[in-house]
Image: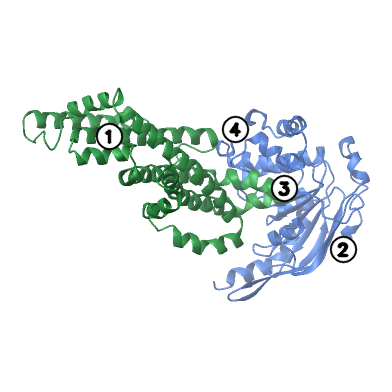
Amino acid sequence: MPQYLPPLDDRPIYRWGALIIVTVVAILWELAVRTHVVSGMFLPAPSQILRELVLGLWGGTLLDSLRATTLRVASGLLIGGLAGAVCGLLMGASRRLSRLLNPLVAGVHPIPKLSLLPLFMVFFGLGETPKVIVVSSAAFFPMLLSTMAGVRHIASVHFDAARTYGASRRQLIRHVVIPGSVPMMLSGLRLAANIAFLSAIAVEMVAAKNGLGAEVWLAWQVLRLEELFATLVVIAAVGVTVNVMLRGLSRRVAPWLTAREVTI
Amino acid sequence: MPAGAEAPNAGTRPLPVPEAAGSAASMLRFRCDEVGCVYESRSGAIHALQNVSFAAQGQEVVSIVGPSGCGKSTLLRIIAGLQPPTTGRVSFEWQGRAEPPRCGLVFQEAGVFPWKTVLDNLAFGLEMCAVPRAERVARAMEVAVRLGLNSFLYHYPRELSVGMRQRVDIGRAFVADAPLLLMDEPFGALDAQTRRVLQEELLAIWQASRKLVLFITHDIDEAVLLADRVIVLSGRPGMVLDEIQVPLTRPRDLSLDRSRIHEVTRHIWQLLEADVRRELSLPR
């Protein structure tokens, strides 16, 4: 049981540790380039990357790329995540439905969703639709599987209690199934968000004119390494932001969970 | 025909308090007729219950005592309608109808919803029958005050001690306004001292808002101290060995002279001892 574990260590070192490591590495890196230990041709100095980053965000294409990628990830996560949650709740609650659909899930889940992009482009053209479908389908499965596991992990006493107090099927879903599976749904959402972001970048590298993925690919093609690094910094920053936001979200939707139970 | 079909020790019981007067007119009766339950398992059929017949009605507390594994919990689940009996039947009569009423179920541990606050847990039964929020809260508060939970209304169960969580579970059953409360060893996971205090609280809250309570326990003293009638079940398969009227009056106080129940507890132990020993000497 989580409550018997010692409380979380909240000293500043844990809060700022990652930032300190990044800073130290950046300083060493900068020194290495300045003293010509490594060639600035292959490894641009952090100061150069930072300059490129600022220029790219103000006046450059980086901000537009960020916006395009964010939109793809958000719509994919919304469509795929929501569909995954709903299907997960239904399949978790109904043994018959899960027996019926499990082989299908097992068959489709392992297919890298990016490999379906050409097929979707044949069906839906070259616009946004096939891209969003790939991102959605990537987000769908982790959400589905986590939600399903979440429903299965609800203690049977909670179902028994609700039923004896006269809960209808709808009340059972609302008062037991959904809140009971929220912890697992949140960790499913985190997986889904990360894989959606990953898929969006991959899709953009292959088939988009804009977006962070396209930016990375373009930078490689013209060998502008400081631009490549600047884009990677933006990608990392988005990842960190999304995870912080998800943690805030879980505090709001599941205030009964201890800090330790919030896995994101 | 079980002796308990007649209202037991009706003469010794004080008049119903006004709160319970309304429900006295539409008294709940239920009876189990030759209830049996068989589980199929890989190693063959397991007979959990066999020919269990008894009846209860009105506002009595009936405890069911028996060795562990005798199918007490199964019997409770069957009465709650959570699983059907393999043989026999359970019948109800309440407000002129024959269908089973809603009931409150109290579990050994972790029965309250961890995702609901104390207040919402207490009011859960009323929420299920669409009682408006204001009324729900008012009635939950009443019980919360009685159980000393009023300063924890907005806490989540994980922030409470085990004993307090059991109090929430019991409170939830009393708030629910169900005519029948089923308690499955609600104090089984508590230490002896907490258990004693909660037994007293249960007696007090029952006295204030009487219900028909079916109380399952393996603790013979607890069975006798809390109930008006004790049904003794044998080891597996659970069969009714005896039904015993408890020679105590209400309202009851646990500081009573225990020598008054000595005869009864000794009798129950004599009924059960052989089964308990047999169970222990079985190689597993």
Residue drawn at 34 percent across, 33 percent down: A65
Q: State how far apart marks 2 and 4 are (Cα).
A: 45 Å
Disc 3 residue crowd, few under 14, some 14–19, many 20+, Cα 10 Å: many
Displayed quadrant of residue A221: top left
Q: What is the three-letter code of the residue carrying label 1? A: Thr
- Label 4, on which residue? B155
- Label 3, on which residue? A167
Q: State how far apart marks 1 and 3 are (Cα).
A: 53 Å
- Label 1, on which residue? A231
Mark found first going from the N terminus, 1 or 3: 3
Q: Are marks 3 and 4 on the same chain?
A: no
Marker disc for residue A219: none
The chain that hosts pointer 2 is: B
Q: Is residue A10 left or right of residue B223?
A: left
Marker disc for residue B2: 2
Chain identifier, blue in the render: B
